[in-house]
Amino acid sequence: MKLNTIEEGISSFKNGKPVIIVDDEDRENEGDLTIPAESITPEIINFMAMNARGLICVAIDKKYLENLNIPPMVNGITSNNHTAFTVSVDSSQGITTGISSFDRAKTIKDLIDEKSTPESFDKPGHIFPIQYRPGGVLVRAGHTEASVDLSILAGKSKAAVMCEILNEDGTMARRDDLEKFAKNHNLRIISIEDLISYRFSHDKLIDRVAETTLPTKFGKFKAIGYKSSHELEEHLALISGNISKNEPVLVRVHSECLTGDFFDSLRCDCGDQSRGSLKKIGSEGGIFVYMRQEGRGIGLHNKLKAYELQDSGKDTVEANKTLGFPPDLRHYGVGAQILVDLGVKKIKLLTNNPKKVVGLDGFGLEIVEVIPILGNENEHNKTYLKTKKQKLGHSI
């Protein structure tokens, strides 16, 4: 079964119809039945309880929780996926025990009612709010963020009801099961991955903050600083020569590697790639985009933890998975928007990474050539390079 488009998912939400949202096999590999909070009814609650069978929760923006004085369930989340549950609630008036479909629907409606106050709720209760992370799926690729993002795109509130889908035998419904569920109940099914791509394509993610000249040993560059609208990272574009909208431009989109780029670590080939790219672009002209995506997106400290695991015998992919991360957390929509902002149409891409080719394609950029940028192999990075080639598909 082919997944529905994000536009079709938005249409369902606009019409108050539930949608199934599936995530990646490397994450929870499950599907949630979800609907805008204002569209919830006792009948839909009953459908979720009888057919989806999972925990009925409300993905909700922080402002609602703060206004209603609903605190986190725990101080310090230890679950692998960092799901931000709050204390559970019931409406304080107009319900009975709180568990009936009518009672739960009313509690959900009260959560997004502007007239509600902290006194409108009892704690604990039968509805489980989960705090939505600002930036949505561009920051956290979870069902919570996907549900609220879809609600926002449909012009609804920043809150959505969601329920995990289980099989009749109590096991988690996986992709094949979810497709059957969607067909049997005439529901649309979308993926978080597609929603991420949609937002990268439709949202403005960057702003220019500074522009200056930067003389380097690789040549003189124009340096332009960019700030991402949904995260704290600051990115940099270095431009050598004149950029033509009609001619292919030599481009390297390089993810930050402090240990390799600055300290010349021998555990990776990142320093060789950054210096080799800068030398080639400085000589031939082009653009070097420096993305603050340390450790393939997991951050410096987690990268060092991954190194610890590699010292114990795991490879780079296994280490990431042990820490609860996919092999590669990077997304290239921000880099693509930087290139578009610089007026680039066609690019000759310096990369060994096939995911980067896919990640940049589709943003109005035409990749006319892929040029490998090879580093040096040594006794410390031999296994790392082998893993990137065999498990991540890099052209090394």
Image (cartoon, rainbow, N blue to C red):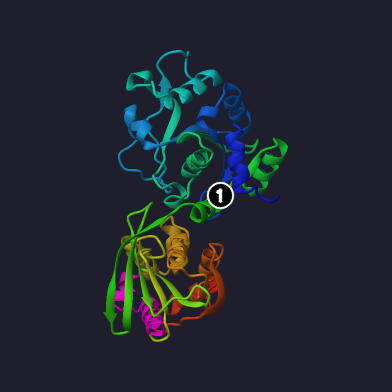
261 in the magenta segment: yes
In the picture provided, is 90 more to the left or to the right than 234? right
Q: What span is colored magenta in the figure? A: 257-282
Question: 135 or 93: nearer the eye?
Answer: 135
Q: Report the residue at 44% width, 22% height from top.
A: 110
Location of residue 286 with respect to 66 vertically, above or below = below
Q: Is mark 1 on a helix, strand or loop?
A: loop
Is residue 198 something one can see in this rendering?
yes
Question: 205 or 84: nearer the eye?
Answer: 205
Q: Where is residue 54 in the image (x, y as percent from the top left)?
A: 55, 34
Q: Report the residue at 71% width, 40% height from top.
A: 183
Location of residue 213 with respect to 329 vertically, above or below = below
Query: Circle 1: is it few (<14), some (14-19), or many (20+) Cα within 10 Å?
Result: few
Is residue 171 something one can see in this rendering?
no
Q: Report the residue at 35% width, 79% height from top.
A: 266
Location of residue 250 with respect to 123 vertically, above or below = below
Q: Where is residue 196 in the image (x, y as percent from the top left)?
A: 51, 52
Magenta region, mostly helix, strand or loop? helix
Q: In which quarter of the image is residue 125?
A: top left
Q: Position of residue 297 (x, y in %)?
A: 40, 61
Q: Quadrant of residue 42?
A: top right
Q: Name the residue under label 1.
A: 29
285 in the magenta segment: no
Question: 84 or 11: nearer the eye?
Answer: 11
Q: What residue type is labelled 1?
A: Asn
Q: Quadrant of residue 45?
A: top right
Q: Report the residue at 40% width, 37% height from top.
A: 61
